[in-house]
Amino acid sequence: MRRLLPASMLLALGLLAVGHVRHACAATTVYECTAADGRVTYQDTPCPAGQRQRTMQVADAPAAPLPATAPPAPVAPPEQAPPPPAPQPTAPLPVMYTCVRATDGKTYLSDNGNPPPYQAPYGVLGAEQLPLSEVYGPDRGAAGISAPEANRGRVTSGLVANNYVWVQDQCRELDVEETCQALQDAYDKNEHKLNNAFKSQRPPLEKREAQLQAQLANCGG
């Protein structure tokens, strides 16, 4: 069955009335059929018998261009993990000693386990001020003396106070746990001073704080 071309195709054919059109692109063959009564029709199949036929090539309409593809959205680079914090500087634990003061028996901390001897008044060491009657009495294994002689030999406080003897504090080395506790106590005291210091007083306290922090890093907590 022959198929008549639409009006749009007929309009295109009217514009191409100059014979055959050859185009490098793909083309459609159109048949112009002229009936015996002179009526002209255009179709895409050969004309019926008895009609005059003429063919022409009509270029196909160009294909619609594909829509432009939007460029892919840039992919943000993966966030890099922040660098690990710099390790806190450490310092070896100091060797510390607890010492007993020879003059009053009080303890103190020192980094010197062999403090130098020093002179102290004999009286502050707890020397007894006894009368000679007690020192040389019969109950002490002596021959004994008379009361007037005993009274003349009494040891006075001035005599004791004016005499000095050499003494030395006794020290022992702290173990690791004791050293860490001593450092923590020193840090707390320094921190208290730092919080209450004026700006001009802070530099040496801040230096001491850094030193104690470095030493406490070896205490494991």
Image: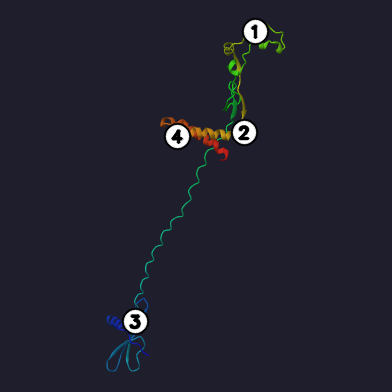
**Label annotation for residue 195:** 4
| Alpha carbon distance from label 4 to label 1 | 63 Å
Q: Secondary structure at mark 1?
A: helix
Q: Which residue is mark 3?
A: 57
Of badges 3 and 1, the one in the foreground is 1
Quarter of the figure with the N terminus:
bottom left
In terms of sequence position, does the residue under pointer 3 or pointer 1 come before the other? 3
User: Mark 3–mark 1 contact, CB under 8 Å?
Assistant: no
| Alpha carbon distance from label 1 to label 2 | 53 Å
* Image x and y of residue 2, in percent: 36, 89
Q: Which residue is mark 2?
A: 175
Q: Which residue is mark 1?
A: 150
* Image x and y of residue 175, in percent: 62, 33
In depth, the one of 208 and 30 nearer the eye is 208
Where, by quadrant of the figure, is residue 14 drawn? bottom left
Of badges 2 and 4, the one in the foreground is 4
Compared across the picture, whether 185 is left or right of 199 comes to right
Q: Secondary structure at mark 2?
A: loop
In depth, the one of 11 and 100 nearer the eye is 100
> Is residue 182 in view from this perspective?
yes
Three-letter residue code for mark 2: Asp
**At x 59% / y 34%, what residue is drawn?**
178
**At x 36% / y 83%, what residue is drawn?**
29
